Image: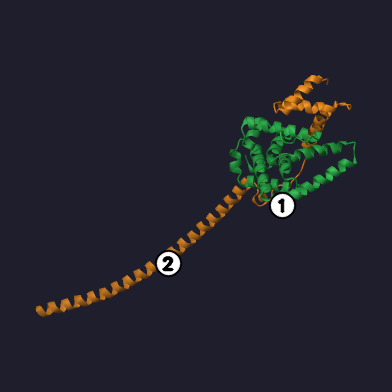
Amino acid sequence: MKTNRNAIEALLEKYLEGQTSREEERLLQHYFRDADEPLDPNWEWARDVFLYTHGEQQLKVSLEAPKTNASSGSSWMRIAASLALLIVTSFGVYRLQEDYQERKMQEAYVETKRAFELISRQLQHAQKQVVYLDYIDQTAQKILK
Amino acid sequence: MNHYKVIDELQSIQSRLYRVARRILVSHEESQDCVQDVMVKILERQEIAEQAKSIEAYAITMVKNQSMDRLKSKQAGFLRIEESRLEDVVSAEDELDETFSSTQRLRKVDEAVQHLPEKQRLVWQLRDVEGYDFEEIESIMDMNASAVRVTLSRARKAIRTQILGKDENES
């Protein structure tokens, strides 16, 4: 790649003014990276700068993934887990409620049965009284006759 | 965008985040710490990050802010001393060896960059190393277009001046 000396000079001027495009800067970087050794001493600073930026661009690190997500897992896993929990608990609650209702009904049944027994006992008692009343009535009629 | 996608994206730009942090913080441990902190924050507040135009720009801006904050919080004290001591060592070596090897030349550039005020250093890093567009740099740095260009121009000129060894740092 032959690049006109004047063109490079002009680009460097533009570079220093902060007016070069990304394309032009890339061109400069390539030019100085491949530059043959006896370089114009006026350009040595530029070669150093572009070699340096190229080196910096290669600087890589590999950080550990942030820890916060280890406990949380992916979002769909979390949704699935909470759904499962919801289903299990609501089923449990439903069952409990059913049991409770059954027990309540049993209690109510026993209670009403007892109530009926009481009523019938009272009724029987009352009937006896009525029988007595009838008896009194009959004797009263006999006396009146 | 789901959780794993955000992690992937962050992982793919982690070196870039690290380089920007280190440009300000210098120390490897501190920069690593800063980047991890930012990544955790972004994952915790994923919805906000997703609203941003790009996760990358959002993350870089956070790294920039956080490393500046960290720097400020410990500015008074040992960091300055450490830096100047390092400079002494470097210049002593340079005097010993008249012919610069390529690593020494690169070290000189590094020194020149580290000499820049923080703002210039960051703008320079974002453009000349990370290759961002001017619009991206404007939004990351919260500066207008002409301010970015002026800052970048100052940084580039100051680096050249420093390399050439002239004593006209303030331009």
Residue B156: which quarter of the image? top right
- In the rendered structure, the answer to whether residue A109 lies left or right of residue B136 reads left
Say which of B24 and A95 sits in front. B24
Q: Position of residue B21 (x, y in %)?
A: 71, 43
Secondary structure under the numbered disc 1 in the rendered image: loop
Residue B77 circle label: 1
Q: Position of residue B89 (x, y in %)?
A: 84, 46
As drawn, the chain in orange is A
Residue for badge 2: A107
Hue of chain B? green
* Residue located 86% across and 41% down the image: B94
Using the rendered image of the protein, determine whether residue A40 is visible from the camera's viewpoint. yes
In the image, taking residue B115 as reference, residue B146 lies left or right, namely left
Answer with the quarter of the image where residue B55 lies. top right
Q: Chain of mark 1?
A: B
Q: Locate residue A27 relative to residue B95 in the image: left or right.
A: left
Q: What kind of residue is marked 2?
A: Glu
Residue B29 visible? The answer is: no
Is A4 rendered above or below residue A124? above
Q: Amino acid at mark 1?
A: Gly
Residue neighbourhood size for the residue with mark 2, other residues' Cα within 10 Å, grouped as few (<14), some (14–19), many (≥20):
few
Work out whether residue A48 or residue A103 is closer to the camera in this orientation and state it: A48
Q: Are marks 2 and 1 in contact (CB under 8 Å)?
A: no
Split into 4 quadrants, where in the image is the N terminus of chain B? top right
Of the pair B50 and A75, the residue shown nearer to us? B50
Query: Residue at horizontal 24%, vertical 76%?
Result: A129
* Identity of the residue furthest to the left in this view: A145
| Above/below status of B108 relative to A4 | below
Image position, residue B12 (x, y; %): 72, 39
What secondary structure is marked by label 2? helix
